[in-house]
Amino acid sequence: KSVHMLSLPLLAPPANVYVYAQEALDPNVIWARRVGMWTVAEAPSRTVDSVAEVRLSLRFERPAAAGPGLVQLLFFHSSELSLLGTTDSDGRRALCCTDRAAAAGACRRAGMLVVRGDGEADEQQPGVWVRDVPFRGPEATGAVDATVRVSRSGVHYLLLASCA
């Protein structure tokens, strides 16, 4: 069953702002946004009030909520891309954990994105920021409001996934 995104403003004035309204995020679909970002220290221009962050304000609605569900959000520097996904026994790359991959020990739980690593992060390797938006039972709505600091300049990804 689809999850409809009511709004997704990525607020970073005076930089990029992305707004999505009434967009469907179907099961087993991953949306990705890729954008170059600077840290405050490396920005070509800045003011006293400059910040390097991504602000997320998301509201999700399931039109036909029959059981539990999950939408996952990931934000990370492009150097962390190799931490995502797994390769199955047939050599196919997958970002979502399947029952078969979980049984083989390639990932922890079916129905979630595969993010390898222990979650440890520091200034040089900030890791992958992950937030889950769970739908318990027949819940029809979910939300997340968060701010993620940009600790490394370069290309960053924001993923929204429904690994049903």
Image (cartoon, rainbow, N blue to C red):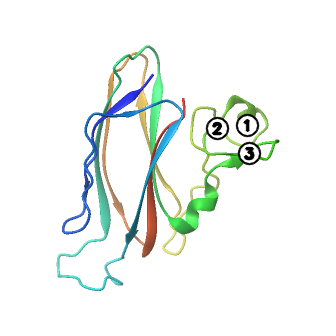
In the image: residue 164, left or right of residue 8: right
Give the residue at x 33% y 20%: 63
Q: Locate the C terminus and report the quarter of the image it occupies.
A: top right
Q: Locate the N terminus and report the quarter of the image it occupies.
A: top left
- The answer to whether marks 2 and 1 mark residues whose Cβ atoms lie closer than 8 Å is yes
Looking at marks 2 and 3 on the same chain, the residue that comes earlier in the sequence is marked by 3
* Residue receiving disc 1: 101
Q: Amino acid at mark 1?
A: Ala
Q: Pinpoint residue 81: horizontal percent, then vertical percent.
A: 58, 60
Looking at the rendering, which quadrant does residue 59 occupy? top left
Under circle 2, the secondary element is loop
* Residue receiving disc 3: 92
Give the residue at x 63% y 60%: 82
Residue 97 is tagged as 2
Q: Amino acid at mark 2?
A: Cys
In the image: residue 97, left or right of residue 49: right
- The Cα atoms of the two marked residues, 2 and 3, are separated by 12 Å
